[in-house]
Image (cartoon, rainbow, N blue to C red):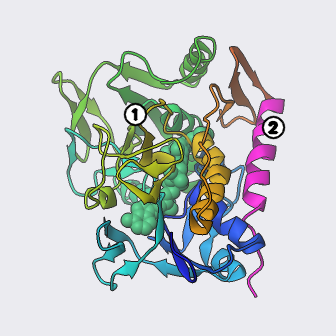
């Protein structure tokens, strides 16, 4: 393995790779350089997006300032989307920037909403990713809609996963802040038989009852095929009137993975061993949503992405020093806390479902503690 001046490159600085950058700030790996590649100068923490919509957090609270963090870590930051990875040549490629060589690469470019089988008229929907621009795109769409005459704003959320559910809970407060007291109706549409994939049998009915109590309609078992400016068409011929359409459907691979010739799962995410190394190259790690462990089923969730951070940090160091790597062992169950936008959260843990104010305070504590690690003062 490489010796002096080992070049370690992080492609995407999200929930997992941010841990490496933070650890590098505390104790860099001797004889190595760190280069971070990010489409934006900020990373976003999805756990705080619903709370930002509901006004519980000021805008910007969900952002990690990568320039400050990279500067504090004495790491290089390239703010440009990577276009692909040439594994043979050992380079990350860009459309405008010259290729960047690496000795060790960690691909943590997240995921994008699944658009398979769907298309949309220009400007007709607001995809949740890139999350860095979601709030601005949402605001602009609402401004556009505010100029049109309508009695009630009809909102459609495509995707009834945990993200889509939390958005439906927290969006009304945002609509009020931007548009004032306008009437609105929110619908969630999901191709599955039920929404809330991954929620426990106790928590799912609680989430459904809370949505019903807020007047959120849930349509399941139908696939959206086309989003028009004023209505959305489904595969079964149903037409759902909708002015604002938010695309929050399940995770698909980010475009950069298409131009990366490494083994992939059937969806197109990079297949990894238990050490988080690609099954096709020991010098490439794939983490968070971008990676799929070949032998263990791990949900594409931020909780797992965050927990991979320490394992990735250990293994990058071990690989650079020529030491043995350790397996990452995913936990079997995890705590889910859904922000219901009313000062409470719905907690789903080990078969328990509790909807209470203390659950929100607990979520806020955990999320704020996570973000505090990355808040550094720029010199
Ligand atoms: C609304 C919403 C709420 C959610 N809430 C939760 C929750 O409460 N709990 C939970 O466990 N999970 C939650 N998730 C899922 C969670 O967000 C993801 O699992 C998590 O973000 C994955 O982390 P990551 O590091 O893989 O990717 P990310 O955190 O998305 O980071 C990837 C980074 O790579 C950058 N990038 C992408 N492509 C390129 C490129 N070509 N070049 C350079 N940079 C690139 C992106 O801009 C981004 O900054 C939620 C998701 C959504 C949409």
Q: Quadrant of residue 244?
A: top left
User: Which secondary structure type mostly characterizes the magenta part of the structure?
Assistant: helix
Residue 230: x percent and y percent? 26, 43
Is the residue under label 1 in contact with that under label 2 (CB below 8 Å)?
Answer: no
User: In the image, which residues are magenta?
Assistant: 357-379
Left/right placement of residue 360 relative to residue 69 reads right
Residue 63 visible in rendering: no
Mark 1, residues whose alpha carbon is within 10 Å: few (<14), some, or many (≥20)? many
The mark that comes first in sequence, 2 or 1, is: 1
Mark 2, residues whose alpha carbon is within 10 Å: few (<14), some, or many (≥20)? some
Q: For residue 352, which numbered disc appears in the image?
A: none
In this view, the residue in front, 34 or 11, is: 34
Residue 189: x percent and y percent? 36, 28
Q: Quadrant of residue 142?
A: bottom left
Q: Secondary structure at mark 1?
A: loop
Q: Is residue 77 magenta?
A: no
In the image, residue 213 sits, relative to residue 294, either above or below, namely: above
Position of the C terminus, as image quadrant, is: bottom right
Residue 226: x percent and y percent? 20, 40
The residue at which mark 1 appears reads as 159
The residue at which mark 2 appears reads as 362
In the image, residue 369 sits, relative to residue 137, either above or below, namely: above
Q: Secondary structure at mark 2?
A: helix
- Mark 2 and mark 1: Cα distance apart in space: 26 Å
């Amino acid at each position: 393995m490489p010796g002096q001046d080992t070049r370690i490159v992080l492609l995407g600085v999200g929930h997992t790779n941010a841990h490496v950058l933070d650890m590098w700030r505390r104790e860099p790996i001797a004889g190595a350089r760190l280069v971070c590649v990010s489409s934006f100068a900020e990373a976003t923490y999805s756990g705080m997006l619903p709370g930002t919509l509901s006004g519980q957090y000021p805008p910007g609270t969900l952002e990690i300032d990568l320039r400050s963090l990279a500067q504090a870590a004495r790491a290089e930051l390239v703010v440009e989307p990577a276009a692909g990875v040439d594994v043979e040549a050992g380079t990350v490629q860009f459309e405008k920037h010259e290729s960047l060589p690496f000795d060790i690469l960690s691909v943590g470019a997240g995921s994008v909403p699944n658009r398979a089988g769907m298309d949309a008229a220009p400007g007709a929907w607001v995809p949740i990713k890139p999350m860095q621009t979601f709030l601005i795109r949402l605001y602009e769409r609402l401004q556009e809609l505010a100029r049109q005459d309508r009695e009630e704003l009809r909102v459609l959320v495509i995707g009834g996963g945990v993200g889509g559910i939390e958005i439906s809970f927290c969006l009304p407060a945002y609509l009020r802040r931007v548009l004032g007291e306008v009437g609105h109706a929110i619908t969630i549409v999901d191709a599955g038989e039920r929404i809330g994939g991954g929620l426990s049998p106790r928590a799912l009915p609680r989430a459904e009852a809370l949505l019903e109590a807020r007047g959120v309609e849930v349509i399941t078992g139908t696939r959206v095929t086309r989003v028009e400016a004023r209505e959305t068409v489904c595969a079964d011929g149903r037409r759902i009137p909708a002015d604002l359409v938010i695309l929050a459907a399940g995770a698909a691979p980010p475009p950069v993975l298409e131009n990366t010739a490494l083994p992939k799962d059937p969806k197109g995410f990079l297949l990894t061993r238990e050490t988080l190394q690609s099954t096709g190259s020991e010098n490439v790690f794939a983490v968070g949503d971008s990676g799929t462990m070949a032998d263990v089923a791990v949900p594409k969730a931020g909780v797992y992405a965050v927990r991979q951070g320490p394992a990735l940090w250990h293994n990058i160091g071990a690989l650079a020093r020529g030491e043995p790597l350790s397996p990452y062992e995913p936990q079997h169950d995890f705590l889910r806390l859904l922000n219901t936008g009313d000062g409470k959260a719905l907690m789903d843990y080990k078969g328990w479902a509790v909807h209470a104010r203390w659950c929100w305070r607990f979520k806020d504590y955990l999320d704020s503690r996570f973000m505090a690690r990355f808040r550094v003062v720029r010199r």
